[in-house]
Image (tube, rainbow, N blue to C red):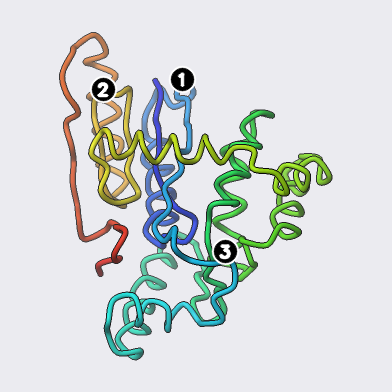
Amino acid sequence: MKIEIWSDFVCPFCYIGKRRFEQGLQNFKHHDQVEIEFKSFELMPHFGKDLGKSIHQVISDEKGIPLEQAKSMHAQLTAQANELGLDYQFDTMIPTNTLNAHRMTHFAAQSGKMVEMSERIFKAYFVESQHIGDFDTLATLAEEIGLDREQALQMLNSDQFTAEVKADEQEAANIGVQGVPFFVINRKYAVSGAQPPHVFTEVLNQVWDETHAESPLIMKSDDSNTCTDESCDI
């Protein structure tokens, strides 16, 4: 069984959704027969590397809401993350463009470490307040999961894997992905949003039982737990 996950590294619901999916997967008795592939999705492709603003100010500006409202939204997200053992640090996060972080996951995939690389980047951004748009930072993260640092830097200083990132995004558009996280199981079912673990378990069991059935994507949707190009709704 193959599961494709479209997400972005600055999407708070994506890391929450990743954890909830992992919990649901553990309750699926065939979890050892599941292949996971992360797909690239840039929520804010117009961002530069260094914005010079806090994430509170960025969201305030992007959504056109008061700064205090943005901080309140982030406090709610922090509480959700805490329930999953994730210690979000919105006050010190460094918002940035994520193209190069996505390129790094494709680089890691060559060594069979896409899942490990994705987890490391999520943690670096949301928990450790590292600059995931910085080449040296990304190369160090790659080294921490066992990849060659110099090769990682060489890749980052080229345009390698940019086409792969854009292909993922085009594929998302082709199948109707409008927000992330977005999970596609065996190209049969789709789960949209950071849904509870039992939802993932139920879908995995259903897909397993209907392996030979042919049908379009059947979506389990929860738009309140999804980030779109324009916003993250609380």
* Left or right of residue 65: residue 101: right
Identify residue for label 3: 125
Q: Which residue is labeled 1 in the image?
A: 33
Tell me the element at label 3: helix
Determine which quarter of the picture holds residue 2: top left
Asked if the residue at tag 1 contacts the one at tag 2, i.e. Cβ–Cβ closer than 8 Å, the answer is: no
Residue located at (33% from left, 22% from top): 186
Q: Earlier in the sequence, mark 2 or mark 3?
A: 3
Label 2 CA crowd tier, 10 Å (few <14, some 14–19, many 20+): some
> What mark, if any, has residue 103 been given in the picture?
none
Extreme residue in the right direction: 150
Q: Amino acid at mark 2?
A: Val
Question: What residue do we see at 64% from left, 42% from top?
Answer: 159
Give the mark, 2 or 1, whose residue is nearer the N terminus.
Answer: 1
Q: Which amino acid type is shown beneath numbered disc 3?
A: Tyr
Q: Which residue position holds label 2?
A: 207
